[in-house]
Amino acid sequence: MALEQDIADLIKSANQLTDTVDGKVQDITAHLNQKKQEIDTKLTAKEQAVDAKIASFQKALPLGPNMLSDTKHFAYINAGQPEGTAVDVLQSHAAPWSCFYYQGTEGVSTVTKLNTSMLAQHGLSPNDDFKTRALGDYRSESNTYYGTDFKVVVFDVEITKGRETDANNGLLFVINQGCPTFTGWTRGEFLTQASCWVNVLEVSGNMKFYPSSNRSASIRVDNSDLNKGWQYKHATRAGWGGCHQPIFSGLGKMKVAIALPYIGMGDHGDNMIWADSVGHPYSHVGPTVVEGA
């Protein structure tokens, strides 16, 4: 009996020790979790502070000229046609712009150029982001947005036949602008950036739009952007690629508006930027003779 009692006491003591150890482990785990949370909170705060510093620095960077021309008024898109008129895409582009269906691709597509007073009637009402970052303050129907002077281009694209080498994907090249050569395409140990405003009104099939492609950093617009209203898109890459070649890709329909495309040097992050290619970069007004060249 004494041996059995000793064994019972030993088991009881072992159980009590186990409970004590389990309790200590739980206390230590809770303490470690608390410390981890405190460290995570501090790291998050530091990351946010660093991000804020970077954004502030990017905002302070000088803004270089646009490597594209005619991006404010699109004067050579639907030239000679009244604003609000849908023009066949192949008839809509004049130099410096070009447009073509590639490698047997077929479709029916139009381009419409709008001024900012026409946006609402075409389903492109400015959202808060567009209002506060791109447009001037609203004034009246006759003078819609204070100090605003740019055009919007709407592409209504339907690709019905794919390429000879890929029946499921046609390519329509739009607002292409030149193939300048540099030290070498896809070379350059410096950052370049691309940005624009887009608004997707319709998407079907596997259609996608790349408002920046090849020469500049790729920007993709697809069905995930549908019904989100006006969005500012920005991307960066190292150096320059080849031709400036925005494209519609796939089969189906896509209706999308674009405004203020820009490609240039540096990286301004998500800060909204635009500049012209010549003259006074921000206002798109060339210097007068009195001012000097």
Image: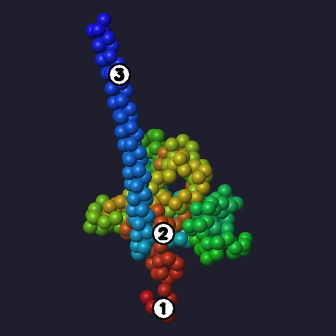
Q: Nearer the viewer, mark 1 or mark 3?
A: 3
Q: Amino acid at mark 1?
A: Glu
Label 3, label 2: how far apart the Cα atoms are: 69 Å
Looking at the image, residue 265 sits to the left or right of residue 122; the answer is left
Please identify the residue farthest to the bottom as the structure is shown.
290
For the C terminus, which image quadrant?
bottom left
| Residue 234 drawn above or below residue 284 | above
Pick the residue in front: 209 or 79.
Answer: 209
- The image's colour scheme reads rainbow
Q: Nearer the viewer, mark 1 or mark 2?
A: 2
Name which residue lies at 30% across and 60% down: 186
**Among numbered discs 1 and 3, the one appearing first in the sequence:** 3
Q: Secondary structure at mark 3?
A: helix
Label annotation for residue 15: 3
Residue that numbered label 1 is attached to:
291
Pick the residue in front: 53 or 46.
Answer: 46
**CB under 8 Å between discs 3 and 2:** no
| Residue 187 drawn above or below residue 146 | above
Residue that numbered label 2 is attached to:
273
Looking at the image, residue 115 sits to the left or right of residue 218; the answer is right
Q: Amino acid at mark 2?
A: Ile
**Among numbered discs 3 and 2, the one appearing first in the sequence:** 3
| Residue 241 drawn above or below residue 26 | below
Label 1, label 3: how far apart the Cα atoms are: 93 Å
